[in-house]
């Protein structure tokens, strides 16, 4: 899925093995860019497993110019705050349970799509994949 703020960008679905890069898209949001074209946003399904090439970094410091790593290189893509319109929904859940909005990641980080989720068979399975509990 792609966040509402990427609806005006060209998009394509994620594929296993994709080497994606975090990128600032027009409109002020970050998302994953396709390796073949930085202008194409890659839409990821909730439950997709990702492996980053280095520990994931977030802006920190007075103006956000000093990066802070969060100590993990793997994450599961989630959609959060789905009941709140016009807010970012794309997020990453890390092994320690920490959830970070994708738009908060530093630009230029690379991640590989390890595994796409199994399509949920029941409403309970779908709810488990989305985990819409983050308010932030």
Image (cartoon, rainbow, N blue to C red):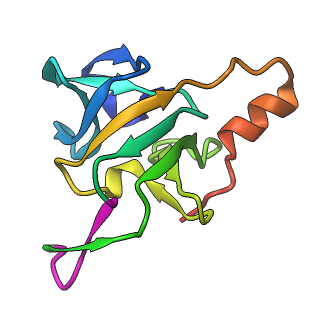
Is residue 16 rendered to the left or right of residue 134?
left
Is residue 98 highlighted in magenta? no
Residue 118 appears in which quarter of the rendering? top right
Q: Which residues are magenta?
A: 55-64
Residue 34 appears in which quarter of the rendering? top left
Is residue 65 rendered to the left or right of residue 11?
left
Q: Position of residue 88 (x, y in %)?
A: 44, 46
Q: Residue furthest bottom?
A: 62
Q: Position of residue 24 (x, y in %)?
A: 18, 43
59 over 11 or under it: above or below: below
118 over 88 or under it: above or below: above
Q: Magenta span: helix, strand or loop, mainly?
A: loop
- Name the residue rendered at 28%, 25% in the picture: 41
71 over 38 or under it: above or below: below
Q: Position of residue 109 (x, y in %)?
A: 23, 48
Q: Position of residue 42 (x, y in %)?
A: 33, 24
């Amino acid at each position: 899925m792609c966040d509402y703020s990427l609806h005006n960008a060209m998009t394509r679905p994620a594929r296993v093995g994709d080497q994606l890069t975090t990128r600032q898209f027009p409109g002020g949001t970050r998302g994953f860019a396709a390796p073949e074209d930085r202008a194409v946003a890659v839409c990821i399904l909730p439950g997709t497993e990702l492996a980053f090439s280095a520990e994931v970094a977030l802006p920190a410091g007075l103006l956000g110019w000093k990066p802070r790593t969060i100590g993990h290189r793997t994450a599961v893509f989630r959609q959060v705050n789905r009941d709140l319109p016009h807010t970012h929904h794309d997020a990453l859940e890390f092994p320690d349970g920490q959830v970070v909005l994708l738009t908060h990641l530093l630009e230029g980080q690379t991640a590989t799509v390890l595994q796409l989720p199994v399509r949920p068979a029941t409403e309970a399975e779908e709810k488990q994949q989305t985990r819409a509990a983050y308010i932030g």
